[in-house]
Amino acid sequence: MPDNVAELKEIITFYHKTVSAEIEEKNKQIGKIKAENIILREQLLIARAWRFAHRSEKWTIEDQQQAHLFDEAEIAAIIDDKPESVTIKTHKRRKKRSRDKLAPIGDEIVHELSPEEQVCEHCAGPLTEFARDKNEELEYIPAQCYRIIHHYPQYVCKNPACCRPVDLTTPEVKSALRKKSLIPKSFLSAGLAAYLFISKFVDHLPFYRLERIFSRIGVSLSRATMSLWTIVIGRKLRRVVVGMRNDLRAGVFATADETPMQVFNEKGRDNRLKSYMWLFTGERAGRPILIYQYHPSRGSPIPIKFLRKFTGILLTDGLAVYNKVTSVLKLLHAGCWAHVRRGFTDALKAGASKTADEALALIQAMYRIESIIRNGSLSPDQILHLRQSQTKPIIEKFFQLMKEAQTKILPRSETGKAIAYALGQEKKLMIFLEFSHVPIDNNITENYIRPFVLGRKNWLFSGSPRGASASVTIYTITQTAIANGLDPYWYMRYLLERLPALSKYQDFISIAPHRIDPKLIKQYAATHGGKV
């Protein structure tokens, strides 16, 4: 009997362990299924938000109260324990826009009554004007192209007793100095080239559309010709970009970003593979510099090569490539709070999240302080004092919240990924507190890269690496001109008129868009019938 009891106990123990193991395994599977369900639901909500909802990253406490209801205390209490005063904006009547800003006055037409009609129907006496009613309309005249023919009369001395040397077998011919062309033996003018470049690289019109536009006004200009002109002039403008690059490297602050582009006929590469357009920004004497570069790869050698000799602070997003760049070049690496905010915004789109709400409330508080800095005329010391006294405590609360929430939230969820990204960037996100000239985010670079993205939607791809290189050169010059408040057409025309005569490095750099005096471009436009 004891043997049977012992055997029975062993059997019971065995089955108990087996059943427990099976239950534990099933619980693990259920946990995985639940986690996967959460992640899939989040992905579905994000996909719906991407398709149907607005894509703005703007977030307010009102958004939290309306869309994400909780029983906990208000998120605003995290930022400030004091009750928040509510300011009701007064109503302001919209002012009518002045029509004087639409366009200059061309013709004024007076619609008079005929002499026979200027007679009173009752007494047959003359009518007297006592007032005038008027209305305005904005007229448009289609663009026009016309040819300019340059004549160079040639002069020779026909006096048989001329004092010219005897050994000359042909007479000496004199004529006016010949005007140098942008492209030898081409009919391309600076005005036409400037229009083509602004149309494509600022207004995002592909050459095939420009070909149709010219055709409507009776000008036969093929897209192949326009593409060739772009490549040739782009190569000539590189020396301007070299000077801009040197000025950027000499600065104390730079940013970097990249976006995909499609380039055909790259050597040894399939046309379906992505290439990249890089953007580096900096400044000289407070004037911005934007430099676009085309490369087939997204690797760290590109920014390392471009930023060599640069010794300032580099601000980027969290792409791992930039970690190697700052390590090799021994640069101080600042992080971007906009990318942190974007992660928590996606988390909210994926469903209600208390942690995401709290994080966004804290980030919003930081941006309120930055708005005061941006809109006020504060000295560098005042900016640092404001950031250290007000922004730093908010950031400390933010990272304390992240570390507490990390252990409670599914790592693969949208909120979990946002927390992991923020904690991975912690040191970089604190850099701007120590330097007044470093912004809180890299949004300005993304704004500068947006014109390229808009253009890419229209022209889709570059036909060759040469075309891509020329395109980024012209993007560099036109977008830097715009960033410095210059009219891009008149600046480009001014530059192209003088380009054939430039030879020395100092000539090229002095005419760069971040160095040229804006008043000079306004004067040039005024003398050529333009308005800036």
Image (tube, rainbow, N blue to C red):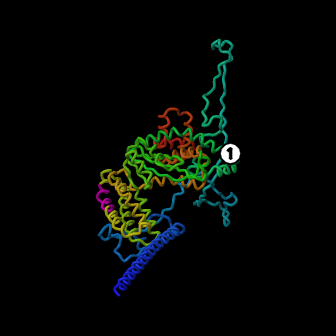
Q: Check disc 1 and report its element: helix, strand or loop.
A: loop
- Note whether 1 is above or below 208 in the view shown: below
In the image, 213 versus 10, the foreground residue is: 10
Does the magenta-highlighted stretch encompass residue 391? yes
**Residue at image location 57% in from the left, 46% down from the top:** 468
- Residue 449 shows in the view: yes
Does the magenta-highlighted stretch encompass residue 248? no
**Residue at image location 67% in from the left, 40% down from the top:** 147
**Residue at image location 34% in from the left, 86% down from the top:** 2
Q: Quadrant of residue 284?
A: top left
From the viewer's perspective, tell me whether residue 101 is left or right of residue 117.
Answer: left
Dominant secondary-structure state across the stretch colored magenta: helix
- Measured as percent of width and height from the top left, residue 321 is found at 45, 51
- Measured as percent of width and height from the top left, residue 527 is found at 55, 41
- Note whether 66 is above or below 178 in the view shown: below
- Measured as percent of width and height from the top left, residue 169 is found at 68, 15
Range of magenta residues: 385-395
Residue pointed to by mark 1? 221
**Residue at image location 42% in from the left, 48% down from the top:** 325
From the viewer's perspective, tell me whether residue 372 is left or right of residue 49.
Answer: left
Q: Quadrant of the N terminus?
A: bottom left
